Amino acid sequence: MLRMSGWILSHERELRLGFFLAIFAVMALWELAAARRRWLQSRGRRWLANLGILAVDTVLVRLLFPAAAVGMALLAERQAWGLFNAVDLPPGLEVVLAVVVLDLVIYLQHVMFHAVPALWRLHMVHHADRDFDVTTGVRFHPVEIVLSMVLKLAAVSALGAPALAVLLFEVVLNATSMFNHGNVRLAAPVDRWLRWLVVTPDMHRVHHSVVVGETNSNFGFNLPWWDRLLGTYRDQPAAGHEGMTIGISELQDPKPKSLLGLLVLPFTARAGSQPISSRHDGG
């Protein structure tokens, strides 16, 4: 187990990068072949800013957390920290349970970033995108990414999650985030079936609506079960997927923001009416 853990850590960057590039390429080509919605903004300028903030996020996380979540899992294993290091379960079951619980943590974190005004200001960088495509799935403010990593490290250590589970979770979460933000068309029967297993683009697109009641629904990134179980699931946007307005009502600039504009957005723009703490009723 320790030998496998060492191999996982030594190849973690290559594995994650390889999966990222493969899924990104598949989604980008799929969007070109079967776009669900017409783009409103220049894709070139949007992609430059969205991928630019991803690059900033990646460098910052590597500087602050060199071993990242997989490293925390290995440390927890050596120190016998956390739930799974205190109970005797089959390794395969531990991996499955750890992935599921970590996904629940990410769901709850997402709700929290909508509920706490200061955190929403950071998260609004993600929601301020007026278009919805694969690059939206990697567009997060660096401070949000750092806070998310701190919460993830705490969850991994508390669980004593196996390193393999953490790596799988990171890879799957990254892949599904790009998938469910894709501007792609799925046949309605396929979407209805698939969204019982994973968050689909049509399911998550509802969450990016300017309508407050729709924004504060469908928080899941990977597994769709938490929204259904906890009462935050919404099947479709009221205006339909082609007719809905994406983004934040107060931030509908026709020109995409630059990388610098995204970095300063939390400190310069109005928070709008989308946060759960807002008193506005979006229906």
Image (cartoon, rainbow, N blue to C red):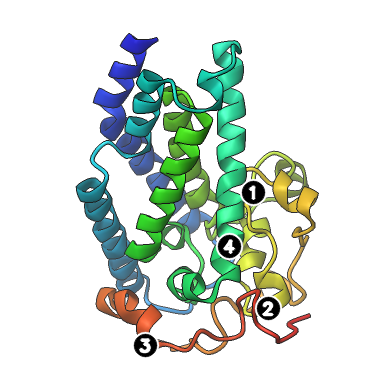
Q: Which numbered mark, 4 or 1, is in the foreground of this view?
A: 4
Residues at circles 1 and 2 in contact by the CB criterion of under 8 Å: no
Nearer to the camera, 49 or 41: 49
In the image, residue 42 lies at what x, y percent? 37, 76
Q: Which numbered mark, 3 or 1, is in the foreground of this view?
A: 3
Residue receiving disc 2 = 212
In the image, residue 94 lies at what x, y percent? 57, 20
Residues at circles 4 and 1 in contact by the CB criterion of under 8 Å: no
- Look at the picture and state if 270 lies above or below 129: below
Residue receiving disc 3 = 268
What's the CA distance linking mark 4 and mark 2? Answer: 16 Å
- Look at the picture and state if 216 lies above or below 271: above
Q: Which quadrant does the C terminus fall into?
A: bottom right
Which residue is depicted at the point 44% across and 89% down? Answer: 253
In the image, residue 14 lies at what x, y percent? 27, 32
Q: Secondary structure at mark 3?
A: helix
Label 3 sits on what residue type? Thr
